[in-house]
Image: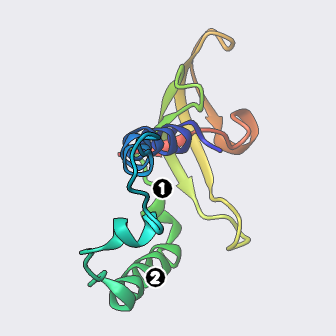
């Protein structure tokens, strides 16, 4: 699980957790007991109006994104950032792979202390396909 996903999950738990606990906790000395906390919580809730139409739009957007040409997903000029976020480089070349289901050949120019200066390396071979890209 990526760090960003962990942070998002933790944030949602921290935001929602106290609300749920506050709504579920009850005073032990109270003579009134709630038989169905869930139905009480949902009382007055509104129906999700996004429904199936919204799902279809999202599904189509994801399908369209997956069918984009490689040149649109990764572009010359994109910034590559290592997973540890301690190294970055500039994408200087993107070549589609001969096998359409495989990652394109991406060349990155970066400052490398290991190579004593600015170096140009292949994303898959040198960086082991790790990291992410941004524009």
Looking at the image, the residue that sits furthest to the front is: 31
> Dot 1, how many residues are within 10 Å of its Cα: few (below 14), some (14-19), or many (20+)?
many
Say which mark, if any, is on residue 54: none
Residue at (52% x, 31% y) in the render: 109
Residue 39, by quadrant, is bottom left
In this picture, residue 2 sits left or right of residue 27:
right
In this picture, residue 95 sits left or right of residue 44:
right
The colour style of the image is rainbow
Q: Which residue in the structure is indicated by mark 1?
A: 74
Residue at (64% x, 34% y) in the render: 121
Q: Which of marks 2 and 1 is nearer the N terminus?
A: 2
Relative image position of residue 118 (x, y in whole percent) = 54, 18
**Relative to 41, does residue 55 appear above or below in the rendering?**
below
Q: The N terminus lies in which quarter of the figure? A: top right
Residue at (69% x, 34% y) in the render: 127
> Dot 2, how many residues are within 10 Å of its Cα: few (below 14), some (14-19), or many (20+)?
few
In whole angstroms, how far apart are the C-alphas of marks 2 and 1? 22 Å
Residue 108, by quadrant, is top right
**Relative to 114, does residue 126 appear above or below in the rendering?**
below
**Relative to 31, does residue 87 appear above or below in the rendering?**
above
Residue 120, by quadrant, is top right
Relative image position of residue 73 (x, y in whole percent) = 46, 61
Q: At numbered mark 1, what does the secondary structure look like: helix, strand or loop?
A: loop
Nearer to me, 41 or 10: 41
Relative image position of residue 104 (x, y in whole percent) = 63, 59
Relative image position of residue 122 (x, y in whole percent) = 66, 40
Nearer to me, 38 or 7: 38
Q: Which residue in the structure is indicated by mark 2?
A: 59
Check contact, mark 2 vs mark 1: CB within 8 A. Answer: no
């Amino acid at each position: 699980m990526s760090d960003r996903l962990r942070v998002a999950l933790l944030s949602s738990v921290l935001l929602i957790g106290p609300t749920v606990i506050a709504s579920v906790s009850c005073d032990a000395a109270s003579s009134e007991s709630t038989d169905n906390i869930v139905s009480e919580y949902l009382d007055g809730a509104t129906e999700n109006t996004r429904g199936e139409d919204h799902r279809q739009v999202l599904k189509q957007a994801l399908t369209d994104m997956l069918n984009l040409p490689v040149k649109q997903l990764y572009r010359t000029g994109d910034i590559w950032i290592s997973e540890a976020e301690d190294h970055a480089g500039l994408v200087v070349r993107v070549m589609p792979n001969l096998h359409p289901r495989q990652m394109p050949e991406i060349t990155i120019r970066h400052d490398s202390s290991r190579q004593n200066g600015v170096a140009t390396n292949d994303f898959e071979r040198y960086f082991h396909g790790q990291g992410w890209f941004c524009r």
